[in-house]
Amino acid sequence: MLEVRDLAVSYGPVRALHEVCIKAAPGKITSVIGSNGAGKSTLLKAIAGLVPTVSGTVIWEGNQLNNMDSVEIVRAGVVMVPEGRGMLARHTVYENLELGAYTRKDKAIKSDIEKIFDRFPVLGQRQKQLSGTLSGGEQQMLAIGRALMAKPRLLMLDEPSLGLGPLIVGDVFTIIQKIALDGSAVLLVEQEVGRTLRCSDYTYVLETGSIIDEGKSGELLDRDSIRKAYLGTIG
Ligand SMILES: Nc1ncnc2c1ncn2[C@@H]1O[C@H](COP(=O)(O)OP(=O)(O)O)[C@@H](O)[C@H]1O
Ligand SMILES: [Mg+2]
């Protein structure tokens, strides 16, 4: 279980997150929706130890993450797929997957790469190709595959739908649902509100650094205020 309590983050004098409280459970997709600049990426980066926190705590499996550095946090099973996918464009698909396992010391890395190829056959076919030459959808699959190489128990995804066509977005969301079904906790940050509410279990609404609403995703999908603000429809 992830429990974020009263988390605050500032960039210099500007407060980006105000006392944010969220939870994310294993086997479930928890989502955070909100407009551009709401603080979604900042929230994921703070959990991942990539930006310093002003106050509050991040508890994961009973341990306090905000005492750890970002590599220790990955070792604790918390892995982020960053916005824009964070691929090494001049490295091959295979090399990017190997890099995903950088915190591991075990001998199963090669066989785990084969498992990624079973799950994403397109990556197997393109394993020697430079990642920068993949399509947007293939790059998103690689970014997720690379994160899985770190064996996450909490997978955080920052706007995986960004820049992808609707068909590929559907494939990506199906993959994310499968990862949760396999038992990981998934924390998904999105601006693609309709699809996110349909595929996730619980949703928080983040605006200007504060959680302004939350509930079961299906209930939020039926709420007029949400439909009006994020889906452009009422009723
Ligand atoms: N490195 C940074 N330095 C200063 N301000 C930042 C930085 N990163 C983000 N911000 C600001 O923090 C706020 C939240 O940004 P962000 O977390 O990227 O939002 P979102 O991911 O929801 O679009 C915005 O006002 C943004 O301009
Ligand atoms: Mg963002």
Image: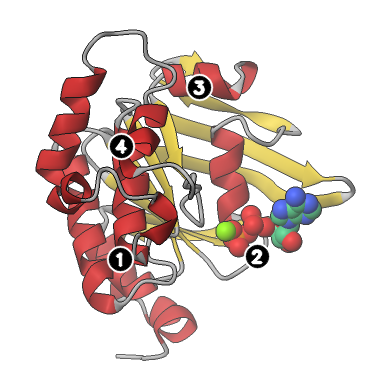
Determine if the C-beta at disc 2 is less than 8 A from ligand 1: yes
For disc 2, the marked residue is 37
Q: Earlier in the sequence, mark 3 or mark 4?
A: 3
CA–CA distance in space, label 3 to label 1: 28 Å
**Mark 3 residue element:** helix
Left or right: 130, with 69 as reference point: left
Amino acid type, residue under disc 3 in the picture: Ile
Q: Nearer the viewer, residue 151 or 104?
A: 104
**Mark 4 residue element:** helix
Q: Nearer the viewer, residue 204 or 100?
A: 100
Determine if the C-beta at disc 4 is less than 8 A from ligand 2: no
Q: Which picture quadrant has residue 230?
A: bottom left
Q: Which mark is residue 11?
A: none
Q: Nearer the viewer, mark 3 or mark 1?
A: 3
Residue 54 appearing in the image: yes
Q: Nearer the viewer, residue 166 or 5?
A: 166
Q: x and y percent of residue 196 in the render?
A: 32, 64
For disc 4, the marked residue is 94
